[in-house]
Amino acid sequence: MSTDRIPGTDPAPTPVERTAGGLLGVAVGDALGATLEFMTPEAIAERHGVHREITGGGSFRWRPGQGTDDTDLTWAVARSYLDGPWSLDRVAGAFLEWYHGSPRDIGGTTARALARLDRTGDPITSGETGDRSCGNGSLMRCIPTALVRADPEVRRRELREISAVTHAHPLCLDSCVAYGEIVAALLEGAEPDQAIEAAASLPLRARVLEALAVDPDTPPERLSTSGFVIDSLRCAVWALGQDAELEEILVTLVNRGDDTDTTGAIAGGLLGVARGVDAIPSRWLERLEYLGPLTGAAVKLTRPDL
């Protein structure tokens, strides 16, 4: 399926190809990075050389191509748009269904928020707001909203509402809005720099704007791939500014170690929308357990106005 499309070398992707690229870009970045989660670059190099295949394993002994919490919760959000009239309660229900399945990998902020949601049934007050709750756990799952919602006000409101079910800190809310603005602009055919500028024109907090302003010439070893939401947003915007093939960009990021699955997922989503699904290596796609559901969802979720 892959042509490893680089901007400027092939016809522009169709809206369906961009939507599929976004959803499947999350999944391949997640599955590629899952093997290396919590490792240092030095440990990765010693054990794997340069890790570039979807092999499973890692700290949680994933099956090759299995979705971690990143893809699981992206699928949960996507389902909330597929299954009928959208509501925040529908999203919350999908999150709780996943939570009750005792997922092997769940972030602390997400776990505490979903435990609270389970007790109260209120998705508006369940999210964490403290300064130690600025993780990337809502950014990793926000792409379906950006793909589906054409109306900017509706899109930004739902991005904030869905984030706040678990991650209600202002930096998380603004990061999801910024990411969503980039995705929406790319979906409508904007060039990467134009899409980033569209996000940077919004009234966002200074740290989010700083992440959007990352220099694409920054050496990858100077990028932090931690679970901090600003670090993840910065890595994704950096990835969007690279001229290399999608494969090489994601391989570079996940080999930086630390929160590899989520860094890969968030960057993979942006690259997938920008480049289209044909830019994703077919050998990666073929390993994904979510390949069928996400491909089918892309057709159903593609905006009819595009």
Image (spheres, rainbow, N blue to C red):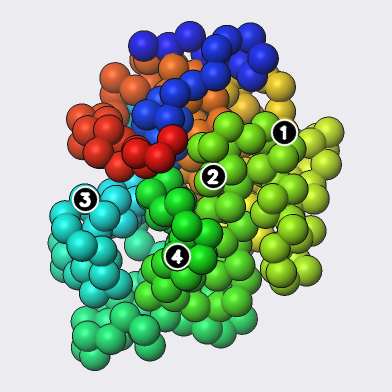
Mark-to-mark CA distance, 4 and 2? 15 Å
Counting residues from the start of the chain, the first of labels 2 and 1 encountered is 2
> Mark 4 packing: few (<14 Cα in 10 Å), some, or many (20+)?
few
Counting residues from the start of the chain, the first of labels 3 and 4 encountered is 3
Query: What amino acid is at disc 4?
Result: Val
Q: Is residue 210 left or right of residue 291?
A: right
Can you tell which of label 4 and label 2 is closer to the viewer? 4
> Mark 2 packing: few (<14 Cα in 10 Å), some, or many (20+)?
many
Which residue is at 63% across, 9% downward? 9
> Mark 1 packing: few (<14 Cα in 10 Å), some, or many (20+)?
some
Query: What amino acid is at disc 1?
Result: Gly
Query: What amino acid is at disc 3?
Result: Leu
Which residue is disc 2 drawn over?
Answer: 183
Label 2, secondary structure: give it: helix
Can you tell which of label 1 and label 3 is closer to the viewer? 3
Residue 82 numbered mark, or none: 3
Which residue is disc 4 drawn over?
Answer: 154
Residue 284's x, y, as percent? 38, 21
Position of residue 97 relative to residue 272, above or below, is below
Can you tell which of label 2 and label 1 is closer to the viewer? 2
Which residue is disc 1 drawn over?
Answer: 241
Counting residues from the start of the chain, the first of labels 2 and 3 encountered is 3
